[in-house]
Amino acid sequence: MHFGSLALNTKMAAPMVLVSQDGIVNPINRVLNEPAKEASGFLLGVSHEGHTTLLMCSAVDKSCDLTNTADLNNELEKLHCHLPVGINVCGLYFMSSTSPSPKSVTQCCKEFIDETIKTTLNTDKLIIAQIHKDQPALVPDCFYLYDVNTAEASPCQVRFGNDMGTQETDLMTFRVQGNLTLNVIYHDDKDLQEALTQKFTSLCNRVQSFTALYHFQKTTILIGASSSDITAGPLNRDSQARDICRHIQEEDDGFGAPAVKGGKKVKKEDKNANQVLDVQLLFRLSLDEEQEGSAGLVPFVHYQIYNEECRRSSMVLPIDVPVIVHRTTLAVTLGKLLSDGVCRQLRAMEQCLKDHFKECGLSVPRPYHFKLPQIPNLITVVYPADLPDDKLESARRSLHNRFLLPWDRPVFRRANAYSFPTTAKNGGYLMNTHIGLPPSGVENGRTSLVQGTYTYHHYMQDHFNDDKWGCAYRSLQTLVSWFRHQGYTERPVPSHREIQQALVDVGDKPANFVGSRQWIGSFEVSTVLNQLFAVSSKLLYVNSGAEIASKGRELALHFQTQGTPVMIGGGVLAHTILGVDFSETSGDIKFLILDPHYTGSEDLKVIQDKGWCGWKGVDFWDQTAYYNMCMPQRPIEF
């Protein structure tokens, strides 16, 4: 993300605030068009060196009174449980009976912003969007900068758009993993609540103590949670977060930047910049946790006798925390940021155990990460392991309300959970193979990509030889995998024979088609999707490969609204389109292609470096062959 023009400096000209159209403007406008028209909540974004971009918004509970500090703090705590460290509350939006003005904003803010809120948000300045109750849409004139110290509001320069979205070259994501043991002893259900609070407080204290260490995987770097020094490894006090990329072991390099760029070898930092970097939570052994700098102690066993009336429960908490930082963040500060993220998740786990105890007892709280439509960052939700999805509908409804999501598609089912590239194998198949690719290179283009998770299906998988005839079958399998991972179906990805049998059953093919090596096209793919999965498709035809460029707007709209992968067939070849990068001004376009003709092993680096998954120009298509595209439509369901 380029932060250069976003300074919030009241001593200079009115600050420029960039506001995401998809993440903030559209969701709030959707609420404003509802009969209830209740719109109030938080503006969320990223800040660095005084510069801010607003990326998304969240709503407060309808029962929340913004003028009640306790209510507001409670809503903030709930929200923080879902946000990664690095995505912050940058301001508020609310409806008012008065038109927005510096005086009106100041008067409203004085009612609900005090020192407690200032401390919680850790900022002196908030971006406020005041919306008149009769206003049909959010407009730039709604936005003001409120100084908490002086209790004064001033206008902002506001620009709506999606061209300020998070760029991987500016932000880095660390993924902290580890296991923490929770032992709870309690007398009755009432006592359990207090016991959980005490135990989780103890775990947070341990994570924030000097005994906690963070090991950056594939490197020798260790950073302490509480100290301001690099514990081990090649970094120093002046090192930045981006410097960690340079020390990732050569044999484990990247998920994908090409080895050659402009004829020169790419720096190791650049090759690893787009990765999610794995971090392991560790603890020093045989040290007194109460006294920093203590000498090693002899390990001991603690034995305690409990009353028979006591209940005891022990479980392993699976920590899995994304943390987002700017690449120039000092490495010595990473320990605290990572610890803050772990503690945030521990509190979410505590709340999960308390909320669902009556339904399933003390069930292991498991974190899931979700990528919301058009939102660059992840949202984390903790679900009890023993409670099935159909018992979590009320929790999912609450999340849809909180993040202003429509009710026409599932978002927070477990099957929708995001899979990190470093663990992106499912049953031997690679998942989301496009993650980590460099930008397409289209100038002033808008990238529209597949939404959610899919698996890569290609020639010669499943111990089945379909070389030179099964590309459309494999593309269909990729499409089906998307519907499985988005929670629309639990039916397995069909084999070639099952695909052929479906076409026979529907009357499209004769009986001897089953077991043959005959090709299928986009029409047959749409037929199978409808027959086996009740998924309808839109078919798009072009007379030649040269005409595909003219379908840029239509393809972009498909990925923005439906988000499903597209199967395209032309001549004797079939491919899968995962997205487009399209410039409205120049008409230039590139296509993100997943090629089912690959016959190698599941090696993501090879697949990306050799272009089996990558951006292709218009010349990729046969300029004289006709093409048909199968564009699956999302079922409308929650």
Image (spheres, rainbow, N blue to C red):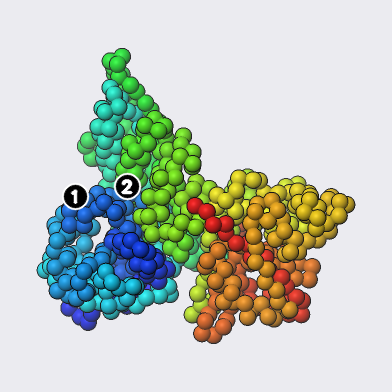
- The one nearer the camera, 26 or 245, is 26
Horizontal side of residue 95 vs 468, given as left or right: left
Q: Which residue is mark 2?
A: 344
Which quadrant would the N terminus be assigned to in this image? bottom left
Can you tell which quarter of the image residue 621 is in?
Answer: bottom right
- Dot 1 falls on a residue whose secondary structure is helix
Picture coordinates of residue 376, whole percent (x, y): 43, 63
Can you tell which quarter of the image residue 104 is in?
Answer: bottom left
Q: Residue at x 76, y 67 (%)?
A: 573
Residue sitting at the far left: 150
Asked if 41 appears above or below 592 in the picture, the reply is above
Q: Residue at x 33, y 61 (%)?
A: 36
Horizontal side of residue 123 vs 179, given as left or right: left
Q: Is residue 202 visible?
A: no
Three-letter amino acid code of the residue under disc 1: Ala
Q: Which residue is mark 1?
A: 70
Picture coordinates of residue 598, whole percent (x, y): 71, 60
The answer to which of marks 2 and 1 sits earlier in the sequence is: 1
Three-letter amino acid code of the residue under disc 2: Arg
Can you tell which quarter of the image residue 308 is in?
Answer: top left
- The one nearer the camera, 6 or 95, is 95
- Dot 2 falls on a residue whose secondary structure is helix
